Image (cartoon, rainbow, N blue to C red):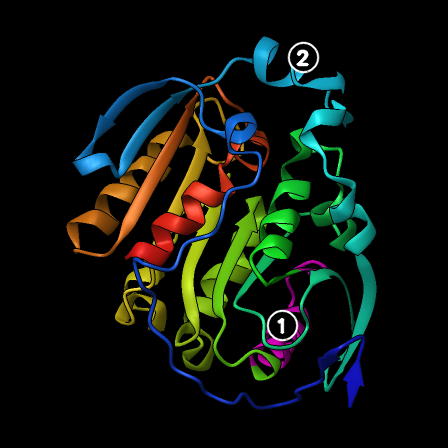
């Protein structure tokens, strides 16, 4: 069965092994506007970055309506026009999702998982979070990629199974694609679950945690065994998930020799990483590992 260009895969996955290459990178899109502000500290060979963040500049100066609508220059309407709603039939029920880009033979696939109380539409909102979701859509569109934003519900067992089915379907239609999994806030539960699913982990080119939590079970996961790169972005004033605990998790990951990079947004809060992550820099780093 085929739904909106993505074939339904129920109960199994076809395995295609791929390896990331330093030569494979995303072409630019609005790099100057979305580049990280001043770097305050760099260590661990550049794998730990402390980046300056200022609400006056990065929200009030960037948005036409603070936290609701970014200024026009940050948005390409092609991303908005390319966004479509779809649903996938799975053995656990119907999964609703949003997508933009190639549903077959994609070179890259990025999947964004929202946090608690979110939905698929959050991940395709062109104007919120400083236009950063528009940018990731455009990066996929301009690089023969596919962007997926599913409804993750409340991260129940059924929700996790539905998302696995979506990734399996997308992978089946694009067997050579490099797959990036990005999870915001409590959506990190999905990232950690999928990291331990062998057929998923074998396809991953990277995992991105955006204002999310730590979980030492990752060290024994299939993704860790496959040395899937981990990119962590976090605000120093996050009151939901403590920065000290996240930095300690980064240090433990590094000590085990696993590929990891952390960006700390100095004075940033819980939602800052979703607004401020440089998608192109993050994905290109993961592809280079």
Residue 263 in view, yes or no:
yes
Quadrant position of the C terminus in the picture: bottom left
Query: Relative to 65, is 177 on the left or the right?
Result: left
Residue at 59% across, 76% down: 105
Q: Please check the rendered image and state whether residue 151 is part of the magenta-colored stretch, yes or no.
A: yes
Name above or below for residue 2 compared with residue 136. below
| SS label for mark 1 | helix
Residue 149 % position (x, y): 69, 58
Mark toward the viewer: 1 or 2: 2
203 sits to left or right of 155? left
User: Which residue is denoted by mark 2 in the rendering?
Assistant: 60
Within 10 Å of the Cα at label 1, are there few (<14), some (14-19), or many (20+) other Cα atoms? few
* Residue 271: image location, x then y, percent: 59, 32
Percent coordinates x, y for residue 3 in the rendering: 80, 80
- Position of residue 134 measured from the top left corner of the image (x, y, whole percent): 68, 42
The residue identified by callout 1 is 157
Q: Quadrant of residue 161?
A: bottom right
Tell me the residue at 27%/34% (across/down). Answer: 48
Identify the residue shown where x is 41% and y is 80%: 198
Q: Quadrant of the N terminus?
A: bottom right
Give the side of residue 16 with respect to residue 274, left or right.
left
Report the span colored magenta: 148-171
């Amino acid at each position: 069965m085929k739904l909106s260009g993505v074939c339904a895969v129920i109960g199994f996955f076809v395995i295609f092994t791929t390896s990331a290459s330093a030569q494979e990178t995303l072409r630019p899109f609005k790099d100057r506007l979305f580049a990280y502000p001043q770097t305050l500290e760099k260590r661990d060979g550049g794998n730990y970055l402390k980046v300056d963040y200022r609400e006056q500049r990065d929200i009030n100066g960037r948005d036409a309506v603070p936290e609701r609508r970014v200024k026009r220059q940050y948005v390409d309407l092609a991303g908005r026009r390319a966004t479509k709603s779809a649903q996938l039939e799975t053995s656990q029920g119907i999964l609703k999702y949003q997508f933009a880009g190639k549903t077959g033979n994609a070179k890259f696939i990025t999947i964004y998982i929202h946090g608690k109380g979110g939905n698929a539409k959050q991940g395709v909102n062109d104007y919120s979070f400083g236009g950063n979701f528009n940018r990731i859509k455009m990066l996929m569109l301009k690089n023969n990629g596919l962007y997926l934003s599913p409804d993750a519900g409340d991260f129940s067992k059924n929700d996790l199974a539905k998302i696995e089915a979506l990734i399996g379907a997308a992978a089946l239609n694009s067997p050579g694609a490099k797959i990036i999994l990005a999870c915001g806030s409590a959506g990190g539960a999905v990232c950690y679950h999928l990291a331990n699913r062998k057929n998923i982990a074998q396809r991953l080119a990277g995992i991105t945690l955006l204002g999310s939590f730590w979980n030492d079970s990752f060290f024994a996961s299939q993704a860790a065994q496959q040395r899937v790169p981990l990119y962590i972005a976090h605000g120093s004033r996050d009151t939901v998930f403590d920065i000290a605990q996240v930095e300690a998790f980064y240090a433990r990951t590094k000590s085990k020799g696993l590929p990891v990079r952390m960006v700390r947004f100095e004075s940033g809060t819980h939602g800052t990483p979703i607004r401020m992550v440089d998608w192109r820099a993050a994905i290109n780093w993961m592809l280079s590992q």
